Image (cartoon, rainbow, N blue to C red):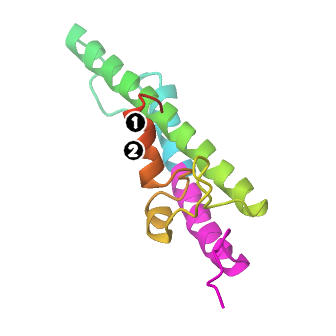
Amino acid sequence: MAEEIKTRYSDEELAEFKGIIEDMLTKARAEYETLRQVIMHNGSNDIEDTSPSFKTVEDDGANQLSKEEASQLAQRQYKFIQNLEAALVRIENKTYGICRVTGKLIPKERLRLVPHATLTVEAKEMLAKQGKK
């Protein structure tokens, strides 16, 4: 009897990945909300602000830089959340873990580390050599 080639993960395996993704989503959303609070904080001297009421030009520059960095981190975090949510949709569609280039199953070890992955490492390297993302 020929060995059957597995074309998708079982419902039990998908449930395991769903749990991993939901945990990551909870943490990612909390971190995103924290970053949004940093960005939205207007620097007024309210009860949360223990710094002196006078600001130097350097302070304003450093404050702006940290808000810009927080904004970039928030954008990255938002994209990560979108990727995790898309992975949940693939789980519901039972297409999760299938490489979008090769059609082969992405190894479980990779999915546990990068649960939103849509490419096998080989496919990713192949695309990188071709100069594509």
Give the residue type that dot 1 points to. Ala
Query: Residue 39 location in percent, x, y?
Result: 47, 28
Q: CA distance from mark 1 to mark 2?
A: 5 Å
Disc on res. 72: none
**Magenta portion: prevailing SS class:** helix
Q: Is residue 19 visible?
A: yes
Q: Is residue 88 magenta?
A: no
Foreground pick, 117 / 56: 117
- Mark 1 and mark 2 residues within 8 Å of each other at the beta carbon: yes
Which of the numbered marks, if any, corresponds to residue 125? 2
Task: Give the mark count.
Answer: 2
- Judging by the rendered image, the residue that carries numbered circle 1 is 128
Q: Nearer the viewer, residue 9 or 92?
A: 9
Which residues, given as a range, are shown in magenta? 1-28
Q: Quadrant of the N terminus?
A: bottom right
- Describe residue 124's horizontal placement relative to residue 118 as left or right: left
Could you say which quadrant of the image residue 14 lies in?
bottom right
- The residue lying furthest to the bottom in this view is 1
Callout 1 crowding tier (Cα within 10 Å): few <14, some 14–19, many ≥20: few
Q: How far across and how far down the image is residue 81, in percent?
A: 58, 46
> What residue is at 42 percent from the left and 53 percent from the top?
121
User: Quadrant location of residue 82?
Assistant: top right
Image location of residue 125, percent across then percent down: 39, 44
